[in-house]
Image (tube, coloured by chain):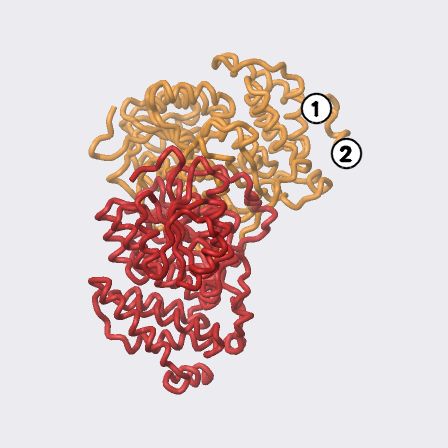
Chain colours: A orange, B red
Amino acid sequence: MTDTPRGRAVAILGSTGSVGVSTLALLERFPDRFRAVALAAGRNMERLAAQVRRHGPALVSVADEVAAREFRERVPDYAGRLVVGVDGPLAVATHPEATVVISALVGALGLMPTLAAARAGKDVALANKEVLVVAGELVTQAAREQGVALLPVDSEHNAIFQALQGHNRSEVRRIVLTASGGPFLHHTVAQLASVTVADALKHPTWKMGSKITVDCSTLMNKGLEVIEAHWLFGMPADQIDIVVHPQSIVHSMVEYIDGSVISQMAVPDMTIPIAYALTYPDRLPLSYLPSLDLPAAGTLTFLPPDRERFPCLALAYQALRAGGTMPAVLNAANEVAVERFLAEDVAYRDVPEIVRSVMALHPRGPATDLETLMAADRWAREAASAWSVASGGGRQAATAT
Amino acid sequence: MTDTPRGRAVAILGSTGSVGVSTLALLERFPDRFRAVALAAGRNMERLAAQVRRHGPALVSVADEVAAREFRERVPDYAGRLVVGVDGPLAVATHPEATVVISALVGALGLMPTLAAARAGKDVALANKEVLVVAGELVTQAAREQGVALLPVDSEHNAIFQALQGHNRSEVRRIVLTASGGPFLHHTVAQLASVTVADALKHPTWKMGSKITVDCSTLMNKGLEVIEAHWLFGMPADQIDIVVHPQSIVHSMVEYIDGSVISQMAVPDMTIPIAYALTYPDRLPLSYLPSLDLPAAGTLTFLPPDRERFPCLALAYQALRAGGTMPAVLNAANEVAVERFLAEDVAYRDVPEIVRSVMALHPRGPATDLETLMAADRWAREAASAWSVASGGGRQAATAT
């Protein structure tokens, strides 16, 4: 399993999502450095077809038979292998030629294939934060055992990863994740109560999928990143801080014991962390991207996060401190709550209420194996689906304050 | 020449200046890590006497016999060696026990002892930027030949040094020095014309000596730092940029070819770069310093430098590009011009005029040896001393615009 003269062999879990699209665009810019050998997509067959025609991967996976039919219609002469359903991402993640797997599926769906990739000895470029939130211990253990790298693609964790290079881990005082603060940074509690789906899908700086965009607005995304940072960098909860930085230029920071703060800044373009994850410890000349022009950017501001208006943050720290299956429960309950909000089945402010209620009902337990975690995940999904304003009681409480 | 169990043996050129005082305060905090073996001071005998009583260096040097008499009166029982005059700093810089020399004399005075330190195989922690401005080629060559480290103490260069750790030098796109902009950042040309000595000595963030404070206000300090950065980091002039950052929190930055900008931030306290230079690649736990609190700091702003209102910047780039003896001439002319301004002998706006006039008269030549550089330095000092409004003609021209 080596990279051929034709460049590094890349498998992508989530090729039609925003990270997948950015990754393929990067691969296209550097055809001598990379080639895409396997792509896992869901149901966006128009995009997948275009990707397959351009990159000619040996393996493709799609969500179901409906998608598979559409794919065959769009690319009738596809000569590679097509895998349908849940086995697809597993096949892509363990494709024999691939030496690095971009893990960019949305939500807990990415967990099993990412774990499989690490266990198969592939380096993992991790864009799916739920993987570490749910199964941080298992995934980091698999990476250690196989001697593979877990390379963060999230802009914040990639920034921390860059800011740790060349300095002693034992001399880190804390890591500081920056948060854009989302579209509701200055909303009052009353305004937060009337947020619509359309409101929540407007993110000020990054263009991303709808689930993560809602998570950014509740700051649950940042909470999940705190848990992810814990696993990636081996830091306890009280050495991971958050600062709101609406301009999203300082992507995160590491503070050392001497008071030095090393940060990585860049224009908000996922190409940069994706490229660094793929070529670490080297960098690619991304001269076609706009440079960071600080005078043009003007002003950088920093605020403490408001843990009262954004209760998802405290819930995430609580789950990290509880450990075991609790982060998996936090994540599953949040996924369902966000789905229900996007379906206009619950209100915006119900999202943290659902997560809180489900966590409160969950008996803490160790995360010894994938089955236990998946059982906790399923249980939390059911509990979050069953939650109603009446049963949860959260709405009344929130309205009363 | 090894460090004993009593800690790293430090010699300080300029012990009673601000960097010297900060260094000794640091040494006092970490008595197991360091000891001061030799101190070079000038005429501040009250301070030197206190330092000697506290640190018991084996060697002390002072400016002249007057200072020496005062020193003997203040510390009658001093058992170490006292050297008087220009040989003093040389003796301190080459003290057999010292393994690192803090080069913090003001101006070109520090050049010979710093070069001597490098040639004697001492690591050099460099706070005196004029050393590299005048003799960058000779000093960096001596350091290379002896295999000693040149460690930057200036907060900007120390920040760049930190931001280069763990990344590939060949992948640097540019380095960006931050400048506070000085007290006259928003002055018009007319306002700059009426600046007094008292105005010029008020620096918004750092507390420093008067020569460097004036240099900060004219931005000549930043110009000298550009030349220093060229020698420290092997970067050509067009890969060294300046951005004005009035809050002095981002101490400088390195931009890489992928668009990532790595910066070091910290509270403005020289202890941090001094400590990093002394313990590199390790850090000291400086937990007694205030932490950088970005939300409390509030807003970070960045502006392009105004090269018209601050002509010293362009003069420094011009000197760097000309090379050879020209940076020495720039520096010497500036030292005299600032002295004359501080003595109220010339106006504030005459400072760049003097430098420009002297540079214009200087025939470019190579900087092959110290004698040539010293001759250029002497010539420039004489020319700058002789400059008058009438002969320079600068005042009229400036007034006309």
Crowdedness of circle 2 by 10 Å Cα count: few (<14), some, many (20+)? few
Quadrant placement of the N terminus of chain B: top left
| Number of other residues with Cα within 10 Å of mark 1, as a class: few under 14, some 14 to 19, many 20 or more | some
Q: Which mark is residue A388?
A: 1
Q: Estimate the x, y position of residue A334 in percent, counting from the top left.
A: 59, 27
Residue furthest to the bottom:
B390
Q: Secondary structure at mark 2?
A: helix
Q: Residue furthest right?
A: A400
Residue B270's spot in the image, x, y percent? Answer: 48, 50
Report the quarter where the C terminus of chain B lies. Answer: bottom left
- Quadrant housing residue A170: top left
Residue at x 53% of width, y 77% of height: B194
Above or below — where is B6 with respect to B141? above
- Give amino acid for label 1: Ser
Mark 1 belongs to which subunit? A
Q: Which residue is tagged 2?
A: A399
In the rendered image, residue B321, in percent from the top left (x then y), is placed at: 28, 65
- Can residue A181 be seen here? The reply is yes
- State the mark number for residue A373: none
Q: Residue A259 or B341: which is nearer the viewer?
A: B341
Determine if marks 2 and 1 fall on one subunit.
Answer: yes
Q: Which residue occupies 31% across, 41% down?
A: A28
Q: Chain of mark 2?
A: A
Q: Position of residue B108 (x, y in %)?
A: 35, 63
- Residue ID at (46%, 74%): B341
Residue type beneath disc 2: Thr
Which of B272/A363 is in front? Answer: B272
Camera-side mark, 2 or 1:
2
Real-space Cα distance between discs 2 and 1? 15 Å
On screen, residue A153 versus residue B186, left or right, reads left
Dot 1: what SS? loop
